Amino acid sequence: MNETLLMLPGPTTVHPRVLAAMSKAVVNHRGAKYGEILTETNKLMADIFQTSNDAYLLTGSGTAAMEAGISNTVASGEKMLNVVGGKFGERFMKIANTHGIETQELAVEWGTAVTPEAIKEALDADENIKAVSLIHNETSTGVAAPIEEIGKVMKNYDALYIVDTVSSLGGDYVDVEKFGIDVCVTGSQKCIAAPPGMAAITLSDDAWAAADKIDSPTFYLDMKAARKSGDKVPPQTPYTPAVSLTYAMNEALNMIMEEGLEARVERHHKAAKASVAAVKALGLELFADEAVSSATVTAVKMPEGITDDQFRGTVRDKYGVELAGGQDHLKGNVFRIGHMGNITYKELVQTFAAIGMTLKGLGVIEDAGAGVASITESYL
């Protein structure tokens, strides 16, 4: 009853069904039983990605999948265009640099989204670009990139289209095949609402063709090794997987399918619109350009005259709701509300009640209930 409500852009609250799944007995990860569970989970994962290609679970965070996606498909010395408009776009570029890839940064102002035209211009200017990396949902800024429209541009070029959907898959519109995504990666602890510690990846035929030409510079994240082990009978992973987390992923993905992927995405979009409206009702200012605001996280400018510790500390310690702060140069200047995973009307009411009471207690606003009233109106 006294647990803190996690309203973070990950990790998110895990459903009791998923937690219960982790209590099942650990089985032999080289045996038929685990092979059956792995096969089912990977198939569910491919269905969520919306691809006919195989999906692979990786024991590691979303960053592991990011590194696997780049290091297996772009060779050292080749050129890569990295869209950077936040913390995680920077991470993609740092990973590429680590593997000796020549990076070209396409900088985007934090709080805004890259345009398809900017991608086209960069590709037209340099035919040596072998791949483009993009964060679909930049949780550091609350911005969602137009991955479908960019995919239409990418189809006219030979460069691979590598997309991070760590904080969007299962909460926003992602269709790997329709959008022409060559490498798509995600993580367990955000919209999928499983515990942290697992990631997933899927590669197109073009991405596999690129991978087959590269001597993988990574041992643990070698996707050719993952493919070889996955083709065994029973299917396996190259190295010891997190068996209990596989159970959790299986249950979480089954819950997504029970809800219906389209219905789940619509639920996230409704929560996002309600959150934006409630932020405005409280007289607060959004950080991200509203036209490209995220479906899974809302970034808000910190009101003048109060500190991050005063605001988020009170929301957490007095009212039991955990919000995220800003990152890098946004630290202390924004706070972020994660509305992803199993979030419903009830959690949003609790969150905006806590925000409203905190702001009134700090002398920032008069009407502590304006946010809750707005949420209620949004869900009528």
Image (spheres, helix red, strand yellow):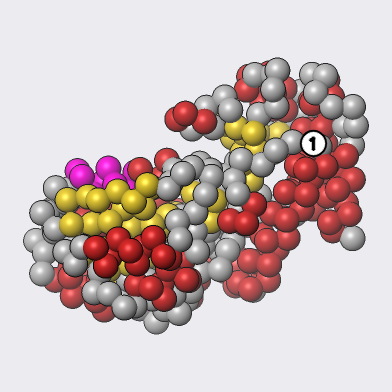
- Eyeballing the image, is 331 above or below 268? above
Quadrant of the image containing the N terminus: top right
Q: Amino acid at mark 1?
A: Gly
Which x, y percent locates residue 116? 43, 65
Residue 237 visible in this rendered orientation of the protein: no
Quadrant assignment, res 68: bottom left
Left or right, 107 with respect to 331, comes to left
Residue 234 on the magenta segment? no
Q: Residue furthest bottom?
A: 52
What residue is shown at x 45% (from left), y 79% (from top)? 178
- As for residue 93 lying within the magenta part, the answer is yes
Q: Is the C terminus in the top left, top right, bottom left or bottom right quadrant?
A: bottom right
Q: Which residues are magenta?
A: 91-98
Where is residue 196? Give x, y as percent: 47, 46
In the figure, is residue 53 to the left or right of 12?
left
> Which residue is more in the foreground, 225 or 247?
225
Label 1 SS: loop
Q: At 49% from the left edge and 32% from the top edge, which residue is drawn?
A: 327
How far from the left and from the top, in percent, is residue 53?
Answer: 35, 78
On the image, the x and y values in percent for residue 62 come to 40, 51
| Dot 1 alpha-carbon crowd within 10 angstroms: few under 14, some 14 to 19, many 20 or more | some
Main structural element of the magenta stretch: helix, strand or loop?
Answer: helix
Residue in the picture at 9% in, 61% down: 215
Q: Is residue 169 visible?
A: yes
Instruction: Give the residue displayed 60% in from the left and 32% down from the top.
Output: 334
- Please give the residue where the numbered disc 1 appears in the rendered image: 283
